[in-house]
Amino acid sequence: MKHRPFKQVDVFTTTPYRGNPLAVVLDGSSLSTAEMQHFTNWTNLSECTFLLPPTPEGAAAGVDYRVRIFCPGRELPFAGHPTLGSCHAWLEAGGVPRGERVVQECGVGLVTLRRDGERLAFAAPPLLKSGPLDEADVALIARGLGVAREDITAHAWCDNGPNWRGVMLRSAEQVLALRPDAAVLAGLDIGVVGPRGKVGVVGPQDAGDTQFEVRAFFPGNNGMAEDPVTGSLNAALAQWLIGAGLAPDRYVAAQGTALAREGRVHIERDADGTVWVGGASVTCIEGQVRL
């Protein structure tokens, strides 16, 4: 074991303990996959990342750092809030990008990040599956969310790796009032009936600093879980909503309100059609860990 620099970062917020936390080990060299996974499980957080030097191929392509992303039980090729939080930790620790933008190497390949003032943003990965959901799936989701079928005003596949299904309700207030039925939505995971995967819910805001309220439900270790703030879901929702004319090219989504969080996700589609998903990060804990 040796002492390694460590940060715990709150992502998609400027207020400590109001976003989505991430553990970042800034020197993951010489650690095995099993050691990384064990430490991730020990943190009891949704994700933990380990920063490493680029591979030779990555270095030749101008990569700034390589990251391995873990959640309890497995390694992930990519995830949104770990990407933003890792980049924040790397820059704060003195990392200097080779170019105007930061280039991260991870399981899906190279990910570009840009700096928007104090915020960072990543380019949304392409959707693996899009288009409307089957009507049977929509009816099941409505029943699981405890809403009438006609309250779902739009729906779409939002699969960019995580198997998200997106549904839009009539208002943000209706989204916040949801009390999902875990027994019904559990069928999304075990495949008893209907689709398999995760459900993302979005509703428009009438006023305030945000245009949409977002909630994310997925199968957890003890039944259904809710994510505080979700980069992958918001990336996919943005591609769906903007592409369908349901959202402007720039907007801010709130997430985590129902969990006493204050997540803010900044979305922008630029002139070449790239959708950028951004947010602030704040370091809550820093020091060293023995690994």
Image (tube, rainbow, N blue to C red):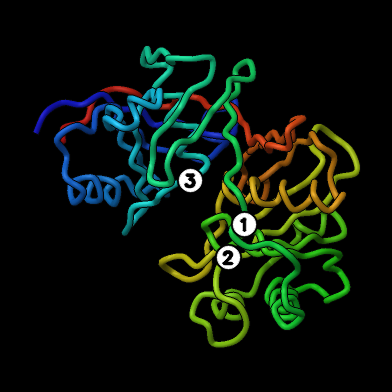
Q: Is residue 19 left or right of residue 208?
A: left
Q: Nearer the viewer, residue 228 or 99?
A: 99
Marking on residue 216? 1
Which of the two discs, 2 and 1, sits closer to the camera?
2
Can you give x and y, in whole percent of width and height, for residue 226 in the image?
56, 58
Can you give x and y, in whole percent of width and height, for residue 156 in the image?
73, 64
Callout 1 environment at 10 Å: few (<14), some (14 to 19), or many (20+)? many
The disc, 2 or 3, on the residue closer to the chain's N-terminal end is 3
Q: Amino acid at mark 2?
A: Lys
Q: Is residue 280 left or right of residue 51?
A: right
Which corner quadrant holds the C terminus? Answer: top left
Q: Amino acid at mark 3?
A: Ala
Callout 3 environment at 10 Å: few (<14), some (14 to 19), or many (20+)? many
Q: Nearer the viewer, residue 141 or 238?
A: 238
Q: Amino acid at mark 1?
A: Ala
Can you give x and y, in whole percent of width and height, for residue 45 in the image?
39, 47
Q: Are marks 2 and 1 in contact (CB under 8 Å)?
A: yes
Q: Are marks 3 and 1 in contact (CB under 8 Å)?
A: no
Q: Is residue 29 left or right of residue 54?
A: left
Which corner quadrant holds the N terminus? Answer: top left
Q: Report the residue at 34% width, 31% height from top.
A: 58
Q: Report the residue at 31% width, 59% height from top.
A: 73
Q: Report the residue at 39% width, 31% height from top.
A: 8
The disc, 3 or 1, on the residue closer to the chain's N-terminal end is 3
Q: Report the residue at 61% width, 30% height from top.
A: 279
Work out how far the residue at label 2 is from the one at label 3, CA to CA, in angstroms: 15 Å
The disc, 2 or 1, on the residue closer to the chain's N-terminal end is 2
As drawn, 188 above or below 154: below
Residue placed under numbered mark 3 in the picture: 79
Can you give x and y, in whole percent of width and height, for residue 288 in the image?
23, 25
Residue placed under numbered mark 2 in the picture: 198
Which of the two discs, 3 and 1, sits closer to the camera?
3
